[in-house]
Image (cartoon, rainbow, N blue to C red):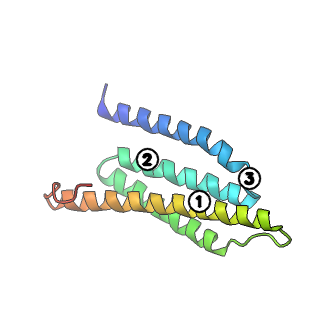
Amino acid sequence: MKQQTINKMIVTLAVCSIGFLSASAIAGQDEFQRQMTQSVLQAKQKLQQAEAAKGTERQKLMSEHMQMMRGMMEKMQAMKPNAGMNMQEHEDWINEHQKLMGDMMGQMMEEHHMMMDMGCMSMGSGDMHKH
């Protein structure tokens, strides 16, 4: 099998796994947080596609991922808990918000590492930056 076909299969399996795992996380969220969770998952798929891609296709997908992350960060910063929540609901909302922010930060770090690897490889010093 070609490496590209194998990479596509891996990305597809990873995306399916994320979908199944996210179903339980969505249960305690408000509507806006559910929408944000879906956006975070879509961005993760884009990042996985970029990781499997090469050259200009990889750069294009990473650029699209960056734009998605920028938009989500703006929305997350504007999010506020609903008025009238009791203490437990408020705490749950905050915990969910922090989880979403953590997921987004993880993606941004992955993207940063990919960019660093690409930069080092393009300079001919691919061994310089290893995790």
Question: In the current view of this chain or complex, which residue is farthest to the left?
Answer: 124
N-terminal-most mark, 3 or 2: 3
Mark 1 or mark 2, whichever is nearer to me: 1
Task: Tell me which residue sits at (75%, 70%) in the image.
Answer: 81
Which image quarter is the C terminus in? bottom left
The answer to whether residue 14 is above or below residue 126 is above
Q: Position of residue 53 (x, y in %)?
A: 35, 46
Label placed on residue 28: 3
The answer to whether residue 82 is above or below residue 107 is below
Q: Which residue is mark 1?
A: 99
Q: Which residue is mark 2?
A: 48
Mark 3 vs 2: CB contact within 8 A = no
Question: In the current view of this chain or complex, which residue is farthest to the top?
Answer: 1
Q: Judge left or right: residue 88 versus residue 120.
A: right
Mark 3: which secondary structure? loop
Per the model, the C-alpha gap separating discs 3 and 2 is: 27 Å
Mark 2: which secondary structure? helix
